[in-house]
Amino acid sequence: MTPRTWKIGSLFLLLLLAVLVPVLFGIGGPTNLLEQVFAFALFAMSYDLLIGYTGVVSFGHAVFFGTGAYVAGIFLVHSGGSTAGLLMGIVVALGVSVLLSLLIASISLRIRTVYFAMITLAVGQTFYVLAGSQMLQPLTNADDGMTVPLPVWLMHDRTVYYVTLLVLVCCVWLLRLFVRSPVGQVLQGIRENEGRVLALGHSVYRFKAVAFVISGLMATIAGILYVIAQTFVSTGVYDVSISLDVLLMTIIGGVGTLYGGLLGALLIIGAQTEFTNLAGTFPIFGRYTILFGVLYIVIVRFMPRGIVGTVAQALKRWSGQEE
Amino acid sequence: METLLEVTNLHVNLAGYHILQGVNLTVPEHAVTVLLGRNGAGKTTTMRAIMGYLRAAAGEISWRGQPLAGLRPYQIARRGIGYMPEEGHLFGNLTVQENLAMVGTKGTQHAARLERALTLFPDLRTAWARRAGTLSGGQKQMLGLARLLVADPALMLIDEPSKGLSPGMVEALAATLCVLRETSTILLVEQNFHLARQVGDYFSVIDEGHTCLSGAMAQLVERADWQRQYLGLAVTSGEV
């Protein structure tokens, strides 16, 4: 069996399992958890496109996630949860995301990586403050956040589950097409050595900007999925801790593997939920972020390719495809 | 014969050192010009300055009569100058196929050029799905040259392609460069005089950062004293 067969087989099994979850485990706890996982998996994969495929590190990627969640939420709230409101919210969120990513790219992508990361962090924090400000209270309900009504056809948990799953599958397929396209290959070249890409006649800045826009769009869709799944949005979606969680998901799953984000999101969100439940009986589990820190160090030290990357490499060695 | 590239009195400073102190170079179309000189003479610096990686402190580099000053490397590449440095400029984590696709994948001309490159370097077909980082030194040079062929620039800058290759591989490389010279214009940096004399039409010698000699390769082949004086060859001409 080749690594490709393994990969296709595992993805097919995962998909089948995901489709069967509502049938096997019922609606409620497991599906609610997985809806969150789907949203964060897409968010983590969008981040992987930046850090793993282009070598660009952003500490404020939550700005796109939060914008998706807030814009869709605002339109849903102000349209009374109509389908038209949802559609308008999606279109406007995607439009805002493109403009925002182009703006950030134009002011920060030409500078050194570390400053780029700092600028994204600053932009993310600006949005965090804006979303919670009293000035925008009529629109965002400030620090109290908004309970978001959904269209009638989206009121059933089962529908929300399958919609989020379907959107995730479509986005994964699009991301896969993108990273395998000639543009995706140039991005991987940029990650390896920008100077070499320049010698081939490619504008590194333009390619990075394209990656940033696509990554931002995917994170925005993830934010929209999140608000649909949670029916609530607050300033927490812009918090820097969200960006750091997603960084952790990407690194644990496997940087530059695309699918690593899926596994990372499942592990981190699953663990967060489980530890929070356990904390009721054993208070020590309330400090689970310390465990995440240890896990992060262990992965970076012993499995720098993350779980998916390490397994893929082992399979390649086993099948003799890698020297 | 039209002059493609002209370098006039080029000066380049690097890390506080005055590395190039007056390089003059003319690269005519449809010929192979070989840039010769001892280690550290400034050959690679000249190539990097032409590609825009290094800024000229003085002097001019012109392409088809137009100055290249102020252009970024990708803009210079788009004008038709392809560059293959010593290390090949490959992407080690990408496969052979992906490395070749980096210069574009569309059009029938591209397909024809790819086919020509793979005919010249059949080893690359068998290594098609292998990561470039796992190729041997010779295969890496082949891949670097193949990518230049697929990109099909008007001028190929090739920096020491024979470095680190076995004598057998150098012979194969010489044969390949002889095929390329029929259709391409090449500026070649080469320390191996045996290879240089086989493929070169013209030469230019850089010594301590400035051009000290240039002309037709046939002249240099004739002059054992020049070879001794400028290239440090301690044997009679015709031998390595």
Image (cartoon, rainbow, N blue to C red):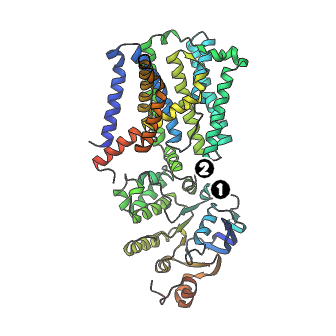
Q: Is residue A161 left or right of residue A9?
A: right
Q: Chain of mark 2?
A: A
Residue at point 44%, 60% (across, down): B143
Q: Is residue B61 left or right of B135 when viewed as pictured? A: right
Residue drawn at the location 62% of the way across and 24% of the way down: A92
Residue A261 visible in the displayed image: yes
Mark 2, residue position: A203
In this view, the residue in front, A288 or B29, is A288
Q: Nearer the viewer, residue A146 or A168?
A: A146
Query: Which amino acid type is marked by label 2?
Result: Ser
Q: Is residue B67 above or below residue A58?
A: below
Q: Which quadrant is home to the C terminus of chain B?
A: bottom left
- Say whether marks 2 and 1 touch (CB < 8 Å): yes
Q: Position of residue A44 (x, y in %)?
A: 49, 32
Q: Position of B116 compared to B226: left or right?
A: left
**Which is nearer the eye, A272 or A285?**
A285
The structure residue drawn at horizontal position 49% and vertical position 63%, both measured from the top left corner, is: B87
Q: Helix, strand, or loop for circle 2? A: loop
Q: Who is closer to the viewer here, B198 or A77?
A: A77
Residue under circle 1? B72
Q: Residues within 10 Å of mark 1 (few under 14, many from 20)?
A: some
Return the x and y of residue A255 as percentages of the image width and height.
46, 40
User: Height in image: B87 above or below A119?
Assistant: below
Q: Quadrant of the N terminus of chain B?
A: bottom right
Q: Quadrant of residue A96?
A: top right
Could you tell me the amino acid type at mark 1?
Arg
Callout 1: residue from which chain? B
Q: Identify the residue at horizontal 30%, vertical 39% (top origin).
A: A5
Residue A121: image quadrant is top right
